[in-house]
Amino acid sequence: MPTEELITTLLQDKFGVPSPDIAPDRTFDQLGIDSLIIVELALVLRKQLGVPLEDDELYPELTVQQAADLLDDKVAA
Amino acid sequence: MTPASVLRGIGSHLPARAVSNDELARQLDTSDEWIRSRTGIGQRFVVEPGECTSDLAVHAGRAALRHAGLFQVDAVVLATSTPDFSCPATAPAVAARLGLAGAAAFDVGAVCTGFVYALAVAHGLIAGSVARSVLVIGADCFSTITDPADRTTRAIFGDGAGAVVLTAGEQDEPGALLGFELGSDGSREELIQVPGGGSRQRCGALAADASPYFAMQGKAVFMQAVLGMAKSSQAVLDQLGWRPEQVDHLVAHQANLRILSATAEQLGLPPERLVCNIARVGNTVAASVPLALHDAERAGRIRPGERVLLTAFGGGLTWGAAALRWPELPLSPSDSPA
């Protein structure tokens, strides 16, 4: 599954963000995600993708696509 | 044969005064909804003026000794970060008040990991034949070190104490502590800290006006706590050859309901295996694990023979895990407010 789709699915199914709101160019802040949810998301992504991810690498101003690109770079590394 | 350390009794104590989220919201810029959604906490208990850590520890220790049917132990190990004094340790006074004349007594400082560390230390005393019986207490009153104007720490922390009695026994006896994993990372000491009041300030390495209040970097701690508890728990599972789904009860440090859920998920444990009492008592630091364990025991939730995994994460940074199969014990009496 493309990483952007994985993030979208997690935001919908696990963190209750309404599906119509989510788009690749929307930031976490715009989606109403608080800083603790970003950390919870990072923990799940670390585990599912098997990559290291520090608590400050995902932050409210990142878009969904930017987060996906960051994770894809880590997977490729 | 090296003696095992076997759980024989458990007790706990909470101060009488409960502080609800609504009461906090009248004093600080916060709300019940904000506190519950971010932490899962609905209330916490706080000490009254004149009440301090030794008082809580004595009540919990007495309850555990009664449950174990013991009047004397060889050692008292007290996990706390809010000792009555910076010197001497609080454990000797607790031992004296419990009538445990002559017992070895000392404090263990590992903040929220304190109780798990104290269990490991007690196990070492028994395994090394230094003691045949140990009273292990986790007690803290963080209401005495949090800034009254800090809406975050005031909401999170509550006061309390929990205790267990361990005595020498056989490795295959139900109640024997079966495995331990402890760790630390002192390079992150600033994440969970009371900056002022210690020798670092008094020697001039810290400003004279360094804060005397407890402070925590919540976001950074969240991830470290989940990873630390999951990693140390997995290490204990690997030691014992237990699969995650075989764990009947995960008693994790009650830092935050979302940390508990994330830890269970990292381990691959169904969420219903989590023991949670954070809504009722908040984060009680070193008392957190024994308080949660005692609440589960009193509710009749833990059956003899069931696999119990304990884990915690705290300032230092420190982390740890331990495991046991629950012994057959008479149900302990209730000592604390509901």
Image (tube, rainbow, N blue to C red):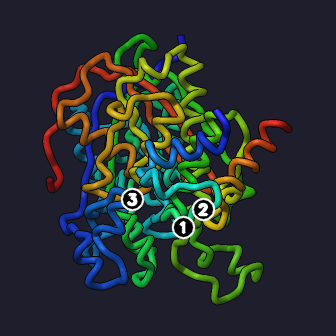
Q: Label 2: which residue?
A: A26
Q: CA distance from mark 3 to mark 2?
A: 27 Å
Furthest-front residue in view?
A20
Q: Mark 3–mark 1 contact, CB under 8 Å?
A: no
Q: Position of residue B60 (x, y in %)?
A: 28, 49
Q: Seen in the image, is A52 located left or right of residue B98?
A: right
| Residue B21 drawn at (x, y percent) | 27, 70
Disc 2 marks which amino acid? Arg
Q: Amino acid at mark 1?
A: Gln
Judging depth in this view, the residue of B217 and B269 nearest the camera is B269
The chain containing the residue under callout 3 comes to: B
Residue A30 shows which numbered tag? 1
Q: Is residue B145 left or right of residue B189?
A: left
Q: Which residue is mark 3?
A: B39
10 Å neighbourhood of mark 2: few (<14), some, or many (≥20)? some
Determine the residue positioned at 78% across, 37% down: A75
Q: Quadrant of residue B229?
A: top right
The amino acid marked with disc number 3 is Thr
For label 2, the SS is loop
Q: Provide residue B236's location: percent of width, then percent of height.
A: 56, 26
For the point 29% across and 77% down, the residue is B24
The answer to whether marks 3 and 2 sit on the same chain is no
Q: Nearer the observer, disc 3 or disc 2? A: 2
Q: Nearer the viewer, residue B5 or A14?
A: A14
